[in-house]
Amino acid sequence: MIKIRKGAGWRFVGRCGGQKATGDGALTWMQSKAAEARALQGALGEAGTKVQPGSLVSFIEENARKGGLGSVLKGVEPSGNDQVLVRFEQAYFHALIAWMIDLHAKGVDASSVSLEREQEPGKVRARLVLGRRGG
């Protein structure tokens, strides 16, 4: 399980591949994924609709469908302070990360991310707390 929390900075907590991840091991793994994330961000560009006032729940649901994650979206619930709790099961890791990059470009950021590897390679179970930037 991987958990990343935003507070006084981002920190890694949890396990990778069934073994407790050390700070250095986690950092190495994340750095190896950074190039992939940058490539996905470049492919998405900065185009897209910015989050508008109104229902963040509706915005997230619509953008999950547009991002190809509608079938694995298991719930979006208000979580106070203009944030939502979003749950996915059997989501492809790379698709989830690409979607989060797209949301960032639209003004929505994650304050908490929890990922758990599914049995099928490349798929994860995810719990995200998302909110409007500056909100």
Image (cartoon, rainbow, N blue to C red):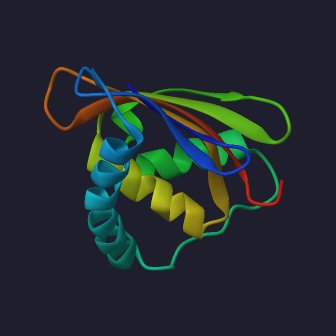
- Residue 15 lies, in percent from the top left, at 35, 26
Q: Residue furthest left?
A: 121
Count every numbered label the image shows and give the total: 0
Q: Judge whether 34 appears above or below 48 on screen.
A: above
Q: Is residue 131 left or right of residue 74?
A: right
- Residue 102 lies, in percent from the top left, at 49, 63
Q: Judge whether 32 appears above or below 1 on screen.
A: below
In this orientation, does residue 11 appear? yes
- Residue 70 lies, in percent from the top left, at 40, 38
- Residue 62 lies, in percent from the top left, at 54, 48
Front one among 104 and 74: 104
Residue at 72% x, 44% y: name it. 7
Residue at 27% x, 65% y: name it. 36
Q: In which quadrant of the rendered view does residue 111 lie?
A: top right
Residue at 67% x, 64% y: name it. 107
Residue at 25% x, 23% y: name it. 118
Q: Judge whether 17 appears above or below 23 on screen.
A: above
In this orientation, does residue 67 appear? no
Front one among 31 and 60: 31
Q: Is residue 112 left or right of residue 73?
A: right
> From the image, which quarter does the N terminus lie in?
top left
Front one among 8 and 125: 8
